[in-house]
Amino acid sequence: MKGIVFRGDKKLDILDFDDPTPGPLDAVIEMKASGMCGSDLHFYRNKPADVIKSLGFKDLASRGMSEDTPIIGGHEPCGQIVALGAAVDARAFKVGDRVAVFHYEGCQHCDHCRTGWTQMCSHGADIHGVIKHGGHAHYMRVPVTSLVHLPDEVSYATGAAVSCGTGTAWGALLRLNISARDTLAVFGLGPVGLSAVQLAAAMGVEVIGVDISADRVERAREFGAAHVIDGSKEDPIEAILKLTGGMGATCAMDCAGGDTPKQQAVRCTRPWGRIALVAVNGNLNVDGMKDVIGKQRTILGSYTMSEVSMKDCIHFVANHGVDVDKLFTDRWKLEQADEAYRLFDAQAGGKGVFLF
């Protein structure tokens, strides 16, 4: 089979790999869709080994790796089971099942793993597309514990989106304990931010979308935003206060990254406001007393989602007819990887996906 390997310095290769075979509790998935995520760009732009070490994976040798070990990228995989290990319970999965893949592997024994928060594994989680082969290939081997059934009414592309980007938005909404009583300000209207707009609107939430890109601001209306704000033309905090009768939003989410959006996400909320920090870039520079303690605000960090909530997100999308597919502005074949990532690196469009 062939797979995409990031080399850093905005270079990648499409290499030949042996077709995977399943271990006793594994499945081999034939890829049908593999999403392109913004975090892929860290590996595309920078030396992958340096990025891996920055994530806390210091001892590569203990994992049978060196700095030059080629790892297939992509952590938004979705496809169909084509082989199962001998010890897999046939009541759980069978060959031919449509599945999305939760892209973390943990010890399966600590409390975090047992509750579906594998990325929080006490012994350290392995990330597909980073430490283990990802979905930018024809086939992928994963433990069956990483699989979530995909209903027939949900496309493979949507399943890929939920595997990280859209699922990350869902996880943050759950962390905010959001409901139709809330007003949510979403800062950053890339794929994760638009997913948050789309999902929250389907829940009946009044959503305010904020970005400095006029195209993204306009697109947020199509995804269900009740109000949109171009942060390059007006102060988002003042605009949100005006929209909410001087009160502020009840909830906010930073999907943009950078110091300023995080600060604005906090300060645009009313007393008792809840803020979810999703984007990994930037620092939170706020006044502890004036911005947090005195306003009784709650600031949450949100790191993707649990495997259980990923399943819930897929079924919410299916049951409410949420058109996640319209997130994808670019659809590619594997052999177009170089062109796909050159375009994606410019960050001028929307979300891309490899279809097989």
Image (cartoon, rainbow, N blue to C red):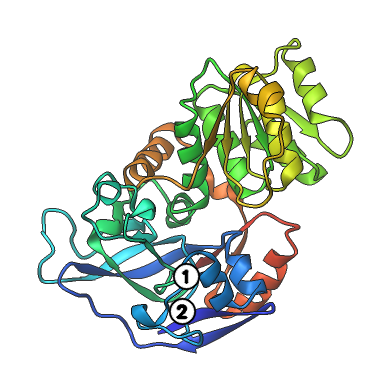
The residue tagged 1 is: 130
Instruction: Using the image, determine if residue 86 lies above or below residue 254.
Output: below
Residue 226 in view of the camera: no
Q: Position of residue 118 (x, y in %)?
A: 33, 53
Is 272 positioned to the left or the right of 315 in the image? Answer: right
Residue at the spot x=24%, y=80% of the render? 21
Q: Earlier in the sequence, mark 1 or mark 2?
A: 2
| As drawn, 71 above or below 347 | below
Q: Based on the displayed image, in which of its 4 quarters is residue 215 positioned?
A: top right
Name the residue nearer the viewer: 225 or 301: 301
Residue 341 in percent (x, y) is at 65, 71
Q: In this rendering, would 121 be left or right of 244?
A: left
Name the residue type under label 2.
Ile
The alpha-carbon separation of the residues under discs 1 and 2 comes to 7 Å
Q: Using the image, tell me which numbered label, if any, was put on residue 71.
A: 2
> Can residue 346 be seen in this snapshot?
yes
Query: Which numbered disc covers residue 233?
Result: none
Question: Circles 1 and 2: CB distance less than 8 Å?
Answer: yes
- Few, some or many residues within 10 Å of mark 2 (<14, 14–19, 20+): many
Neighbourhood count class around disc 1 (C-alpha, 10 Å): few under 14, some 14–19, many 20 upward: many
At label 1, which amino acid type do we have? Answer: Val
